[in-house]
Amino acid sequence: VHVGALELDTELQAKVESYQFDQSVLEKLCDKYALLVNTKDVNATITRDVFDQLMAELHITDSFLLSQLFAAFSEGGELNFRDFVGSLAALTGSVELDDILHLCFRLYDADGDGLIGKDEVSRVLAAALQDRDQEHLLFVVLMVFNTYDADHDGKMTWQEFQRMCETDKLLLLYIQNKLKQH
């Protein structure tokens, strides 16, 4: 099946359809990918530069947010178009909740230490908000950590993050919506 300049195999086409992407956005991404990597192979590696250019198509250009997204999307710095599309689907909430939670946790964990701190959450949300409404941002970060940082050490473990998202569905929706506003 052809989508833009790419021919998608049956498995990837089924995934794409289940993600409920806007067809014109998907076609634009496929065309841009094929142009940038000079191939129609959806398993070819995407470099950080190509990733940044693809994300620019989605109006995401903040360098810190791009760095965090690339780290969260890729495994060991390797990313292909198939995984790129799957990770975008996680941001839009059209995949399993556990996949969304793992992606969000990796997105916030800037230093990769398996913990997320107030500063890491603040930087990601500030980049996603593009410096709008800093008072509200600070309020949300403090509220989250006061409520869900069980040992009050200023760091949230995977288990604390997972409990927060399972307990407070509105907060999870807030996080997802801030990431999708691009």
Image (cartoon, helix red, strand yellow):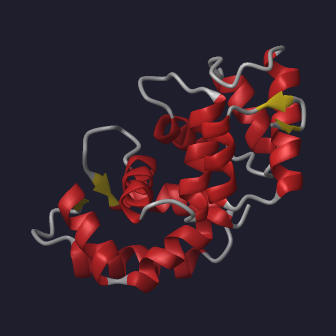
Q: Is residue 30 left or right of residue 15?
A: right
**In the image as oriented, which residue stretches furthest toward the top?**
38
Which residue is found at the position 44% from the left and 51% from the top? 103
Q: Position of residue 168 (x, y in %)?
A: 34, 83
Image quarter (top left, top right, bottom left or bottom right) of the C terminus = bottom right
Q: Tell me, yes or no, if residue 70 can be seen here.
A: yes
Near-viewer residue (160 or 147): 160
Q: Is residue 82 left or right of residue 143?
A: right
In the image, residue 32 sits, relative to residue 118, either above or below, namely above
Q: Tell me, yes or no, if residue 157 can be seen here.
A: no
Near-viewer residue (125 or 77): 77
Near-viewer residue (156 or 74): 74
**Figure quadrant of residue 42:** top right
Q: Position of residue 129 (x, y in %)?
A: 65, 66
Q: Is residue 5 left or right of residue 62?
A: right
Q: Position of residue 83 (x, y in %)?
A: 56, 35
Image quarter (top left, top right, bottom left or bottom right) of the N terminus = top right
Which residue is found at the position 64% from the left and 77% from the top? 133
Which residue is found at the position 34% from the left and 82% from the top? 143
Marker count (numbered) = 0
In the image, residue 112 sits, relative to residue 165, either above or below, namely above
Q: Position of residue 100 (x, y in %)?
A: 45, 59
**Figure quadrant of residue 96:** bottom left
Which residue is found at the position 51% from the left and 22% from the top? 78
